[in-house]
């Protein structure tokens, strides 16, 4: 009995140690990511003080500083959301949601963003309603993150298709793009926090590597599964499987 107790105790300590370590590395990574836009902002302000220019120059600098501030704010929002999610502080609601309808309306919303980049974005309508039980705001966040990535990593002239279907007692949401794809070595890491495959390739593409961690958290909380299939240079397909709501 004592041996059993010792084993459970050891398992518990290991679990706590893992948790503390994850929190520590999260705090470290987050601070590191926050420093970059802050350093850029500091540089801009310093320059503005040292070289006062024409009214036009000043306006341009303020605009650029505002951009850095917005970036910083988006980053802080993302970090806070993920930290709250991981601390178990977020309660999800549970409603019946027609996944096809939700995906269709988000595609309509993002279509102008894709079009501005020269990428075709469309949704394949589901044949019948595909209803899942879940939190509409978080499921919306999930779809937005996947489509947003597809737009970011698909060069001009490419196409993105979002489809929703029903397979046995599972709902399937697919976001398929003809973008840059993901190499097999990087594939196992893309759901890790702050992971960005090939910084050289994705430099200039905004993001810090939190979108897919949050996507995975949302899918887990809905008792689902997320899978990726990708060919470098050809494109990627992200598939989300969620249990159908009981009829
Ligand atoms: P972010 O988009 O902020 O970089 P994510 O967590 O959403 O972070 O994605 C992590 C990494 O996975 C991205 O930096 C990118 O390298 C890769 N990735 C995600 N989605 C795609 C996609 N549709 N096509 C190619 N690469 C992708």
Image: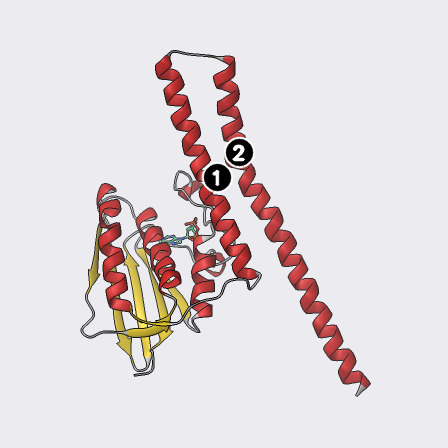
Q: Badge 2 is on which residue?
A: 38
Image quadrant where residue 138 sits: bottom left
Residue 72 badge:
1
Q: Position of residue 158 (x, y in %)?
A: 24, 49
Q: Position of residue 84 (x, y in %)?
A: 54, 57
**In the image, what residue occupies the spot 61% across and 49% down?**
27
Q: Position of residue 32 (x, y in %)?
A: 58, 42
What is the spatial separation of the Cα atoms under label 2 and label 1, in whole angstroms? Answer: 7 Å
**Quadrant where the N terminus lies?**
bottom right
Image quadrant where residue 137 sits: bottom left
* Residue 120 sits above or below residue 229 on the image: above
Regarding mark 2 in the picture, which secondary structure is present there?
Answer: helix
**In the image, what residue occupies the spot 45% across and 33% down?**
68
Which residue is at the front of the view, 85 or 212? Answer: 85
Outermost residue, bottom direction?
1
Residue 170 badge:
none
Using the rendered image of the protein, determine whether residue 120 is visible from the camera's viewpoint: yes
């Amino acid at each position: 009995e004592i041996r059993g107790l010792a084993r459970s105790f050891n398992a518990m300590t290991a679990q706590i140690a893992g948790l503390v370590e994850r929190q520590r590395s999260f705090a470290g990574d987050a601070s590191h990511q926050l420093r970059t836009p802050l350093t850029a902002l500091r540089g801009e302000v310093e320059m503005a003080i040292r070289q006062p220019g024409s009214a036009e120059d000043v306006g341009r600098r303020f605009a650029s500083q505002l951009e850095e501030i917005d970036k910083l704010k988006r980053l802080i929002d993302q970090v806070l959301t993920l930290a709250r999610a991981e601390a178990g502080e977020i309660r999800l609601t549970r409603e019946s949601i027609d996944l096809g309808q939700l995906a269709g309306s988000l595609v309509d919303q993002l279509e102008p963003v894709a079009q501005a980049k020269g990428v075709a974005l469309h949704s394949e309508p589901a044949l019948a309603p595909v209803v899942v039980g879940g939190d509409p705001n978080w499921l919306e966040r999930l779809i937005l993150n996947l489509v947003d990535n597809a737009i970011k990593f698909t060069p001009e002239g490419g196409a993105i298709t979002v489809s929703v279907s029903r397979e046995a007692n599972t709902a399937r949401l697919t976001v398929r793009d003809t973008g840059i794809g993901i190499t097999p070595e990087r594939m196992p890491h893309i759901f890790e926090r702050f992971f960005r495959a090939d910084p050289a390739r994705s430099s200039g593409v905004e993001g810090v590597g939190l979108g897919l961690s949050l996507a995975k958290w949302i899918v887990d909380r809905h008792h689902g599964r997320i899978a990726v299939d990708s060919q470098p240079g050809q494109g990627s397909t992200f598939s989300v499987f969620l249990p159908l709501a009981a009829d």
